[in-house]
Structures are given as C-alpha cells and as structure tokens.
Image (tube, rainbow, N blue to C red):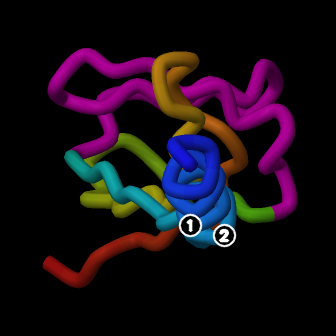
C-alpha cells in the first residue's frame, strides 16, 4: 500500500512543467566572435547555443534580461530569450 502514494508523488513531480528563470544586469563585455556575455555581477554567459537569440546592437552598457530553463543542480539549461531593457 505504500507504493501507491510514492507513485502518485513521483507522477506529480514528473508532470510539473519546467519553469523559466531569469537573470539580468548591465553588460560589461560582449564578445560576438566567441559568443560570451559578461554582466556586472561577474556572471559569464556562454551564448553559443543561443546565438540567434542575441539582439542586434547588444553592447557594453546595455541592461539585459536573460530568460532560461533551469537545469537544477547542473545550472543553466536552454536559454529561451535575451532582451535589452529600456533605460
């Protein structure tokens, strides 16, 4: 009888959709060749898999928001979007 509650809990966890997370900050550096973005909080983002999502005109000084899927303990999963925020 203990197996049923365990299966129900597992099924509800697996059925939960992945939620997108966001990160943001001011761009300190952006290397278009190596697809690397550095924000003012010293986070370094590898944008290689999201190359087509990089907005035109992205440069140092822009405030950006990055939307991504979290990969749990592994960190960042897929980058879903990058936007330049209005000042």
Work out whether residue 40 or residue 13 is closer to the camera in this orientation and state it.
13
Residue picked out by circle 2: 15
The picture places residue 28, in percent across and down from the top left corner, at 30, 30
Question: Quick check: 35 above or below 58?
Answer: above
Q: Which residues are magenta?
A: 26-52
Would you say 17 lies left or right of 23 here?
right
Q: Position of residue 43 (x, y in %)?
A: 33, 21
SS category of the residue bearing label 2:
helix
The answer to whether mark 1 and mark 2 are in CB contact below 8 A is yes
- Quadrant showing the C terminus: bottom left
**Image quadrant in which you'd find residue 34:** top right
Name the residue: 22% across, 45% down: 26
Give the percent coordinates (x, y) of residue 75. 50, 24
Q: Is residue 40 magenta?
A: yes
Residue at the extreme front: 1
Residue tagged 1 = 12
Residue 47 placement: quadrant: top right
**In this rendering, would 52 be left or right of 24?**
right
The verdict on residue 18 being magenta is no
Question: Residue at 85% across / 39% down in the picture?
Answer: 49
Q: How dense is the environment of label 1, judged by Cα within 10 Å: few (below 14), some, or many (20 and up)?
A: few
| Front-lying residue, 70 or 43 | 70
Judging depth in this view, the residue of 55 and 81 nearest the camera is: 81
């Amino acid at each position: 009888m203990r197996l049923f509650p365990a299966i129900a809990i597992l099924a509800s966890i697996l059925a939960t959709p992945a939620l997108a997370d966001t990160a943001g900050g001011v761009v300190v550096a952006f290397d278009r060749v190596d697809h690397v973005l550095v924000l003012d909080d010293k986070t370094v983002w590898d944008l290689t898999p999201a190359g087509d999502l990089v907005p035109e005109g992205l440069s140092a000084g822009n405030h950006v928001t990055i939307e991504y899927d979290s990969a749990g303990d592994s960190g960042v999963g897929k980058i879903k979007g990058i936007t330049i925020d209005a000042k």
